[in-house]
Amino acid sequence: MNQHFLREADLELQVTTLPNGLTVVTERMPHIKTATLGMWVGVGSRHERDEEHGLSHLLEHMAFKGTRRRSARKIAEDIENVGGEINAATSVEFTNYSARVLGENVDVALDVLGDILTESSFDEAELAREKGVILQEYAAVEDTPDDLVFDAFMETAFSGQAIGRPILGRPETIRRFDGETIRSFVTREYAPQRMVLAAAGQVEHEAICAAAGRFFGALPAGSQNGEGAPASYTGGERRLPRKLEQANIVLGLPGCSFKDPRYYATHMFAHILGGGLTSRLWHELREQRGLAYEIGAFHWPFSDTGLFGVSAGTSGSDAAELVEVTLACARAATADIEETELARAKTQLKVALLAALESPGGRIERNARQLLAWGRVIPSEEIVAKVDAVTTEEVRQAGAGVLAGAPTLAAIGPIRKLPPLDRIAARLRG
């Protein structure tokens, strides 16, 4: 086993790699009486082949639908009998399975997590029912314009690529999946080198490692290739005219990876432009002109690419003006960001970062994701120092670099008055 120890403030963080490559990270938090545990897997929707679209999400659902020794009800009972809760989530690049229990019941949680991750039966009757649930979830998104517009945005920004496809999948692929398809995907993708078992709260590292060895030590090493197909930003537009009261608009541009040196500067440019009640977009479009009830900017980083964007809801009659003013605000920000704006953005970013670490759940997410991405846990002090080191000129340059990219437009609702994409591209250049 490889093992190291890190002390951050009054917390104790230890990392051990088991012989099969599984990483175990624990963080003992004094005064916390509960334990939060989770298995993070460096596998998400971008790792699916074309015929597997939606399989990562279905697998997450099926993990709770029965194993060789537990029924779906027994899984729930074993956790809830000790007052615990269990959950899972799928994203573009990660899937996680987590549980929270009293510190004294850690073994119960690990037993259940180990069972669902190594012994799931993928019963065909349960699979049929769960596919029905996911199809209802898909229909709910189709009926929710402010969700659907983001799916359209990702699909357009990364046209024809797994990274851009909706995580839920499509009805035609969901209906085709069977137990053997799921088992093949797990065998191929769920290698222990791409998995991190994280625990925080009232936990003891050696006990967690011993349990991890019992429940996951027999997992075969498998493939370490977890990057998925390289992403290629395409840009373009997707317009979905509908008879709705409001137009939902997302205007985007290529961003950068969380491994890119420009990451923090790009993130702060997004925050200054549209990250809060003092941001430029909120002040100009919401407070001064009344063009939108909600408007904000975002930067989504992935392992090898990123997306920068502005999202807003507005009336059809105001859509053209909203886009024009948004573009003007973005161009102006590349030239005249002030030190006071940057200082405020830095402080807000640090508060968000540190607040997320105040709960065991936030701790295990930080630790697991960083170990999967970087092979180490990055101390908060190191990240804060990088945030503090960003200069106004770097933020301006990052913004100029973003605006130099080809635009992506997704819009749903009364959008007849939206300007054409070539005009938007021209306005981005001034």
Image (cartoon, rainbow, N blue to C red):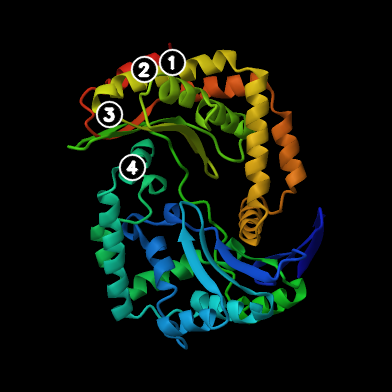
Q: Position of residue 12 (x, y in %)?
A: 79, 61
Residue drawn 65% across the image and 48% down it: 355
Number of the front mark, 2 or 3: 3
Q: In this orientation, which residue lies closer to the viewer: 199 or 77?
A: 77
Q: Position of residue 253 (x, y in %)?
A: 44, 29
Asked whether, in this view, residue 51 is left or right of residue 121, the answer is left
C-alpha span from label 2 to label 1? 6 Å
**Which structural element holds mark 2?**
helix
**Quarter where residue 112 is shown:** bottom right
C-alpha span from label 4 to label 2? 21 Å
Q: Label 3 is placed on what type of residue?
A: Ser
> Of marks 4 and 3, which one's residue comes earlier in the chain?
4
> Of marks 4 and 2, which one's residue comes earlier in the chain?
4
Q: Which residue is mark 4?
A: 146
Q: Which residue is mark 3?
A: 315
Q: Label 1 is placed on what type of residue?
A: Ala
Q: Position of residue 409 (x, y in %)?
A: 33, 30
Q: Badge 1 local density, few (<14 within 10 Å), some, or many (20+)?
A: some
Please identify the quadrant where the N terminus is shown.
bottom right
> Of marks 2 and 3, which one's residue comes earlier in the chain?
3
Residue drawn 77% across the image and 43% down it: 381
C-alpha span from label 2 to label 3? 14 Å
**Which structural element holds mark 3?**
loop
Q: Are marks 2 and 1 in contact (CB under 8 Å)?
A: yes
Q: Are marks 4 and 3 in contact (CB under 8 Å)?
A: no
> Of marks 3 and 1, which one's residue comes earlier in the chain?
3
Q: Position of residue 341 (x, y in %)?
A: 62, 23
Q: How many marks?
A: 4
Q: Which residue is mark 2?
A: 324
Q: Which residue is mark 1?
A: 328
C-alpha span from label 4 to label 1? 24 Å
